[in-house]
Structures are given as structure tokens and as C-alpha cells.
Amino acid sequence: MKKAIAILLSLTMILGLAACGNSASQTEQPSTEDTSVESKADTNSAESRTAEFEPESEAAQPDDTEETEPAPDTDTESEGTKVLVAYFSATNTTEGVAEHIANGLNADIYEIVPEDPYTDADLNYNDNNSRTTIEMNDPNARPAISGSVENMEQYDIIFVGYPIWWGEAPRIVSTFMESYDFSGKTIVPFCTSGGSGIGSSASNLERLTSGATWLDGRRLNGSDSQDTVMEWVNSLDLNLAE
């Protein structure tokens, strides 16, 4: 009987020790599920930090090689059609008309100034030996001009004004017409005179140029108002850009 009791006590102690060992083993080792969760959390945190500093993908970045359209030439568009009023005026009569045109069109103005100014004696058409008489009797005469037009190529329309001498434009205007390339430009002649019309003066000047479009000219009076002058200018339908 005593042996049986001793055996039972021994078994009880062995079972107790075994139970304690299993409990300690479970306490010391974390569960696999917990380890998996922590590992995922650490991975997500690392990916989040990486994404924060990672540059945009190539698909999201602008294509540096993509061609861009050139910006419009605003200077050319804003300037529109460029107009020049060029004139020769020995007695200031033609000058007033030229100024009316330039003011009305907000155009540039250029005076054809002789290198050797004309004197009253030079302008005496009753003197067969006066300078103007000699020049007008010589179709090849080309009096020198002082100065020149800067950047003539920028102008699209050119008004050319002059007085009528012996039924023609003064020879110095011929000098002017032969001094520049008027190809592709529109030329509008006008003259002043006490009675003579523009006659063949404009067509004779046209022969000195090539590639230009010549419009019909008109004789105007030095006493004409700007409204009168501009009425003629507006009738030309020049279609000037705003």
C-alpha cells in the first residue's frame, strides 16, 4: 500500500514538473502570429519612408525632349503695317501735306534734303541758266541727298511727295528712288502744284524701281486741311493693320 502511494506521488510530481516546463516554454517564445505582424509593420513603415523620398517615376516626369511650339513674334504683330512718308519740299509747300499724311496715319516721316541746298536763284525757272532749269533739262541729273532712311526694309507702304517742276518730279526725287530697293512695297506718289496735275511724273518715277506696287497719285494743295488730305488717303483702301 505504501508503495502504491509512493508511486502515485512520484507520478504527480513528474506531471507537475512537465506542466511547468511547457508553461515556461510558451512564455519565453513569442507566437509566430505576433512575429508576422511586427514584420509586416516594419516592412510597411520602411516602404512608407522610401516612398516619401523616392523621385517621381519617368511616366510622371515631364518629357524634356518634347518639342515646344515657338512663342509668337509679338513685336511683329504689334507693329502691324509700317508706313513712311518721304518728301522733298524746296519752299515748304509739300512739307505741310506730308505732315498731314504722317499725322493722320501715325507714320514715320523723312525729308529728302539736298546735300547742296537750293537758293532762291536756283529756283528761278525764268532763268535758263538757273540750277533747277539745268537739272530738269538733263534726265540723267541726280542731285546728291544729305542723309538716308534708316532700315528702309521695315516699311511696307511709302508715300513719296514732291513739287512739280517743269511738269516732272525734281531730279533729286529720282536720286531717292534709285537709292533703295522697293521690292514688295507699295508706293503712293503725291505732288503739290499751283496748277499742273501729277501728269506723267509718277509713271516716270515708277520706271526707276522694280518689284514695287504703285498706286495712282494725286495733286494736292499746300493749303489743304488734314481732313481733306486724309479723305484722299482713306479712299486708297490701304487696309492698314490696327
Image (cartoon, grey):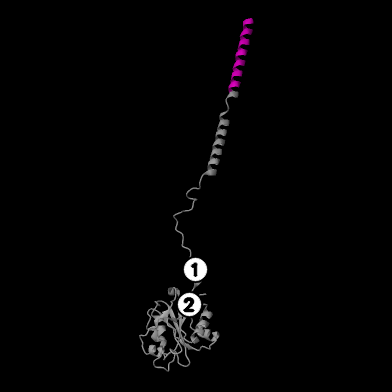
The residue at the point 57 percent across, 36 percent down is 41
Q: Residues within 10 Å of mark 2 (few under 14, many from 20)?
A: many
Q: Which residues are magenta?
A: 1-25
Can residue 20 be seen from the camera position used here? yes
Badge 1 element: helix
Within the magenta stretch, is there residue 233? no
Position in image of residue 68 (x %, y %) = 46, 59
Give 187 or 24, whichever is nearer the viewer: 187
Give 147 or 183, whichever is nearer the viewer: 147
Say which mark, if any, is on residue 32: none
Within the magenta stretch, is there residue 13? yes
- Residue at the extreme bottom of the image, as rendered: 126
- In which quadrant will I find the N terminus? top right
The mark that comes first in sequence, 2 or 1, is: 1
Give left or right: position of 191 versus 33. Answer: left
For the residues labelled 2 and 1, the Cα–Cα distance comes to 16 Å
Q: Amino acid at mark 2?
A: Val
Residue 114: name its quadrant.
bottom left
Q: Amino acid at mark 1?
A: Asp
Residue 52: name its quadrant.
top right
Q: Which residue is mark 2?
A: 83
Say which mark, if any, is on residue 75: 1
Position in image of residue 180 (x %, y %) = 40, 77
Badge 2 element: strand
